Image (spheres, rainbow, N blue to C red):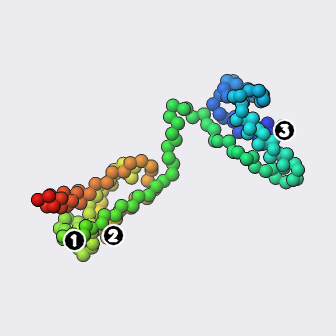
Amino acid sequence: MARADEQLYAAHRDDPQPNPLFDAQGNRRKLDPNDPTQADVQREWRSRYTAEIAKKKSGGAAAKPKTTPPASSNRSTDDPVLPCTIKHWLVIRLGARPNQKARDHEGQVDGQPGYAGEKYAASGACGTKEGMLDGGSSLRFHNIKAGHCTIVFKHFYEDIEAFFKEQLR
């Protein structure tokens, strides 16, 4: 029983205080079976206690509690969303329209299909970069942060605008 107590208090040591287990000064509060504010920690304690009993009966390692308490922190609740630390990748490929006419924009790679060599400008989570699409008409960014990324293909948009103007005549 003492081991389950120690595990429970240790798991919630860094939770914002006061809380069902600690007063405002960080002193431990005893579990009270009649206190409804302690219902969640009582269930957690029972799970830990049951695991310790199973350990003693089996003579081996303690069985894991059925529920794992959420990670705690002293983070303010004013901004509960944590920043994403996972790095992402982005691949963009521009495909040619059916029956596309030859293009003569600066940087166009002769003999390459689609938009190989198309100039781009990127900004946002992917950083600020300028360059040209590779021979497969694609662009890759690796290890970028979560967020928005804006990519502009000036000549591509000019071609699309000209195409629609021609179609609307």
Name the residue carrying label 3: 1
Q: Dot 3, crowdedness within 10 Å: few (<14), some or many (≥20)? A: few
Name the residue carrying label 2: 136
The circle drawn on residue 99 is 1
Does the residue at mark 3 contact the one at mark 1 (Cβ under 8 Å)?
A: no
Question: Which residue is pictured at 54% across the width and 32% down the height?
Answer: 77
Does the residue at mark 1 contact the one at mark 2 (Cβ under 8 Å)?
A: no
Residue at the farthest top position: 24
Labels 3, 2: front one: 3
**Mark-to-mark CA distance, 3 and 1:** 78 Å
In terms of secondary structure, where does tag 1 sit? loop
Residue 135 appearing in the image: yes
**Mark-to-mark CA distance, 3 and 2:** 66 Å
The earlier-in-sequence mark between 3 and 2 is 3
Q: Quadrant of the C terminus?
A: bottom left
Q: Callout 2, which amino acid?
A: Gly
Q: Position of residue 104 (x, y in %)?
A: 17, 68
The one nearer the camera, 101 or 142, is 101
Q: Dot 1, crowdedness within 10 Å: few (<14), some or many (≥20)? A: few
Labels 1, 2: front one: 1
Residue 72: name its quadrant.
top right
The circle drawn on residue 18 is none
Labels 3, 1: front one: 1
The one nearer the camera, 130 or 124, is 124
Q: Position of residue 25 (x, y in %)?
A: 69, 24
**Mark-to-mark CA distance, 1 and 2:** 18 Å
Q: Callout 1, which amino acid?
A: Asn
Is 126 located above or below residue 48 in the figure? Answer: below
Question: Which residue is pictured at 18% across the width and 59% down the height?
Answer: 164
